[in-house]
Image (cartoon, coloured by chain):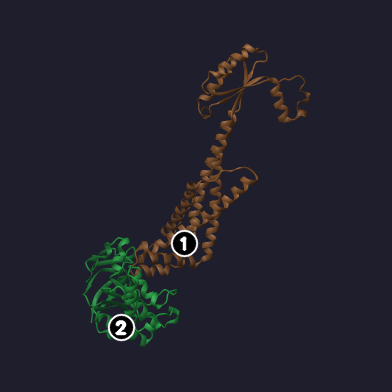
């Protein structure tokens, strides 16, 4: 008990010995961890976007211009018999033109003359297949149904988005790694400054029989506290930012309680890492 | 109680500062280690309190081989030794009481034990009235007495004093020597390194002389 009290007292001494160094370190950790948090929120939302696009993804199956009602029905039955096709909607030439007018405006389609747009079936696929290797084979088989002229492949966009988000993911992990390294070094530098100024104290403590852990622990706590405060402030800032964007621009998902706890706890681990780095690298106790 | 057997130490290859030295110190014995500056007196003390490691030989204190102790266990030997330096090594941000209490805090003594022991020690060195003063408010003699009180805190078997009067005037030197004799009479062994032969005469105790890396008994 006495040991603990003394360790807490020494931690307090270390924190208040050069308070502006500690404040500077916390601010820098806040900046670095805000970047890390923003990446986490981006990644979190990227998964949501992909899932949402997958749910809405449709494939346009364009029918031959000369198809009759029998052929149209035959195509519909062939599509309906495919287990990956969850829904089929018929889009007539007039409906296609209406949509185009809605999309581009009446001015853009004025010069088209007779309606050149084909009629089609708009089919929605099982979201699971959009990620799978079976998709090209499925599209080929739909394309080879007699009466089908072409396929408008919306899931291509999903694939492109997935590639984009995978890149963002890799970039995010690299940034996370850099944030971990930079936060550790920021904390290590702050602690090494404190340690250098109190080297005489450590020497005397060791001389009178203090165990190395007794001398080190307060500085590990300092690293932990700097990091926990820094990551907590950045979490609050991110929360406020996400709330603002959600209410004024677009709804954005935020970290749940467990993820937020992991974010701050991870920060604490980074702080301990930084403290240990300083003690190992800059002093031999 | 303390035994050095065939101890050698060099800081540069081929330049032995201590060359195969051996001597021992009994429980309750007082000895002065003399020699010119740079002869290796402080090195012997550093080897004993574990700041340096011998290249060869054994240093045994209370059946513990100091040279073979792992760095993580060096505190075990330091709790049996009190060290006094020429520059006192007091912590400037702590007052007299806290400087002495530090030695007891780091070994996990309770507040009550610390309070009792620090009072005893400050009475012994005659500084109880100055317990709230900071090192910069003390004279050299007073600072050294605080350092002695701190060195005695954990009832050490051995006091190592490295030129303890180097920064003191004649009167303060005499007072510190008197204090060391009193501590020795209470059963604590004392090994003092000094280049001042007058001190060795004043203490009227065993003298070990260090020259060219060798230690010899001197009269």
Query: Which hue is chain A drawn in?
Result: brown
**Picture quadrant where residue A4 is located:** bottom left
Mark 2 residue element? helix
Task: State the green chain.
Answer: B
The residue identified by callout 1 is A192
Image height of A32 relative to B48, above or below? above
Residue A220: where, in percent of width, then height? 43, 59
Please determine if labels 1 and 2 lie on a single subunit: no
Crowd class of label 1 (few under 14; some 14 to 19; many from 20; radius 10 Å): many
Looking at the image, residue B10 sits to the left or right of residue A149; the answer is left
Which of the pair A46/A95 is nearer the observer? Answer: A95
Q: Nearer the viewer, residue A95 or B53?
A: A95
Instruction: Work out whether A174 lies above or below A78.
Output: below
Which numbered marker is on residue A148?
none
The residue lying at 52 percent from left, 63 percent from top is A21
Q: Nearer the viewer, residue A196 or B193?
A: A196
Residue beneath disc 2: B179
Q: Label 2: few (<14), some or many (≥20) within 10 Å?
A: some
Q: Position of residue A7 (x, y in %)?
A: 40, 64
- Name the subunit of mark 1: A
In the picture, which quadrant includes the C terminus of chain A?
Answer: bottom left
Visible residue check, residue A37: yes
Whether residue B197 is visible here, answered yes or no, is no
Residue at the image point whose x is 65% and y is 46% from the top: A248
* Chain to which mark 2 belongs: B
């Amino acid at each position: 008990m006495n040991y603990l009290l003394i360790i807490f007292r020494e931690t307090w001494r270390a924190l208040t010995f050069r308070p502006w160094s500690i404040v500077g370190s916390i601010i820098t950790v806040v900046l670095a961890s805000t970047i890390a948090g923003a990446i986490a929120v981006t990644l979190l939302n990227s998964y949501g976007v992909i899932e949402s696009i997958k749910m809405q993804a449709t494939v346009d199956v364009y029918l031959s211009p000369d198809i009759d009602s029998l052929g149209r029905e035959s195509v519909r039955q062939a599509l309906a018999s495919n287990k990956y096709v969850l829904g089929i909607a018929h889009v007539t030439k007039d409906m296609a033109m209406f949509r185009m007018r809605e999309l581009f405006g009446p001015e853009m389609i004025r010069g088209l003359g007779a309606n050149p747009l084909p009629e089609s079936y708009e089919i929605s696929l099982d979201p699971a297949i959009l990620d799978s290797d079976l998709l090209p084979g499925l599209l080929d088989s739909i394309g080879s149904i007699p009466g089908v002229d072409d396929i408008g492949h919306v899931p291509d966009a999903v694939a492109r988005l997935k590639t984009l988000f995978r890149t963002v993911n890799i970039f995010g992990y690299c940034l996370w790694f850099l944030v971990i390294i930079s936060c550790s070094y920021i904390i290590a530098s702050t602690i090494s400054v404190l340690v250098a100024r109190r080297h005489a104290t450590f020497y005397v403590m060791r001389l009178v029989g203090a165990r190395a852990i007794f001398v080190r622990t307060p500085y590990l706590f300092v690293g932990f506290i700097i990091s926990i405060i820094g990551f907590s402030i950045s979490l609050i800032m991110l929360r406020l930012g996400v709330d603002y964007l959600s209410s004024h621009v677009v709804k954005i998902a935020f970290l749940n309680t467990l993820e937020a706890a992991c974010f701050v706890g991870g920060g604490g681990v980074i702080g301990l890492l930084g403290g240990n780095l300083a003690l190992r690298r800059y002093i031999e106790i | 109680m303390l035994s050095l057997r065939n101890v050698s130490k060099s800081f540069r290859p081929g330049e032995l500062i201590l060359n195969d030295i051996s001597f021992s110190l009994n429980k309750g014995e007082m000895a002065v280690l003399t020699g010119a500056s740079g002869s290796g007196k402080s090195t012997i003390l550093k080897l004993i309190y574990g700041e340096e490691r011998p290249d060869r030989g054994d240093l045994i204190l209370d059946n513990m081989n100091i040279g073979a102790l792992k760095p993580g266990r060096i505190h075990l030997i330091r709790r049996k030794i009190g060290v006094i330096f020429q520059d006192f090594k007091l912590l400037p941000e702590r007052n007299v009481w806290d400087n002495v209490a530090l030695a007891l805090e780091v070994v996990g003594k309770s507040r009550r034990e610390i309070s009792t022991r620090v009072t005893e020690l400050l009475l012994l060195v005659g500084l109880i009235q100055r317990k709230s003063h900071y090192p910069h408010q003390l004279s050299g003699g007073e600072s050294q007495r605080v350092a002695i009180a701190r060195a005695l805190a954990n009832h050490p078997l051995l006091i190592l004093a490295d030129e303890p009067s180097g920064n003191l005037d004649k009167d303060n030197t005499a007072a510190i020597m008197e204090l060391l004799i009193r501590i020795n009479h209470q059963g604590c062994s004392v090994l003092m390194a000094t280049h001042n032969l007058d001190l060795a005469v004043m203490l009227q105790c065993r003298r070990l002389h260090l020259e060219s890396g060798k230690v010899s008994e001197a009269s």
